[in-house]
Image: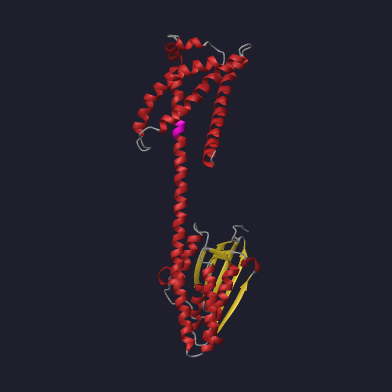
Amino acid sequence: MTYEADTRFGHWAWRILFAAALWTSIGLIFALPGLGMAGQRKAAVLSALAMWWSWGLLSFLIIAVDARLPFSATQLGRRVAAHVVLSVLCTSLFVYVLIAMRALLGLQHWSTLFDARAFPNALRGMFLWNLLIYWVIAGGWQAYRYNQSYVSSELRSERLERQFSEARLNVLRMQLNPHFLFNALNTISSQVERDPRLARAMIEHLGDLLRLSLESKDKQEVPLAEEMEFLEHYVAIQKIRFGEHLKIEVAVTPEARTASVPSLFLQPLVENAIRHGVSQRSSGGTVQVSAACVDGRVTIRVADDGVGLPAGWNLQKSSGLGLTATRERIAGLYPDARSRFAIRNREGGGTEVEVELPFRTVNGDRA
């Protein structure tokens, strides 16, 4: 027996066992009133079981026929009309199934099946009740099908949304990486003729940056420690370029280093602090990078003491590619307002970017 066949057999075995337990339980419940009659207990139990086991067998037929109706779920009127006809046929068939079941349990003789009076007598006494049971079974099956369809639709929707989100994040990363590479190469080219030795050192750091970038190309999130390693090489290039005019201060707690963060998100923030803040001052300045965990969240700040934000600056309309891509990646990875991305003027001058994320490690553990 193949794995697929074995799986199908196990699936159907569980269905049959569940159906047997369900219809037996219903039969025992309906047998309770007859248990109080001395000498009639066995007959009461067997009669109730015969009735509900018969409907249990017919329920498989009802489900099988319903599955083959040539009507879609939206053609409700036609499906109901088909079940009106089927309910009469199935209720009529139930009479003979019940007689056979009662004969199997020793409650009556098999010859009753061929008694011309058995069918009309049974219909007169139980037709409306059994018709109601048919519609309960058919209605319950339709509700189950609808629920399964709804759950499957929800799962498909979630899967498509996740795939769309991942594709969107990858597009943003592809926009960001060439942008970063262009800026890094531009920085190196400015030093090639002026100081070849420094240019070679910058190329070595760029090689390390590209290696780390390729290693993380399939990762949406990495530990903050990996981001800091990537940032070290970028900062080394910038410090060679600016010399004493650029100072970098880093304060990251050990716990924060284990936090899962978007890959390659920190470098654009530091690049903006250097390019639009520190480099605009003839005396240079300082860029501070800090990260700490508080109350199950990790807060990362990149601050500079440069010229600050210009009047009327707006994050949605005024930010460049680096900040825009970073903000959108963070929003995509942490939907439902679980993240915060803010840029503001810093007290004492300069600009501060604050990113707040739910704390979790790369393997999914949370604080």
Magenta segment includes 95: no
Left or right of 329: which side holds 301?
right
For image coordinates 49% across by 17% down, the residue present is 98
- Residue 266 x/y as whole percent: 53, 71
| Residue 292 visible, this angle | yes
Q: In the rendered image, which quarter contains the C terminus?
A: bottom right
Q: What range is drawn magenta here?
A: 138-142
- Residue 67 x/y as whole percent: 41, 33
| The residue positioned farthest toward the bottom in the image shown | 194
| Residue 304 visible, this angle | no
Write down the quadrant of residue 72 in the picture.
top left
Magenta segment includes 141: yes
Residue 275 sits above or below residue 53 on the image = below
- Residue 25 x/y as whole percent: 57, 26
- Residue 32 x/y as whole percent: 59, 20
For image coordinates 50% across by 25% down, the residue present is 57
Instruction: Describe the colour scheme in one phrase.
Output: secondary structure
Between 109 and 303, the one nearer to me in the picture: 109
Residue 125 sits above or below residue 81 on the image = above
Majority secondary structure in the magenta region:
helix
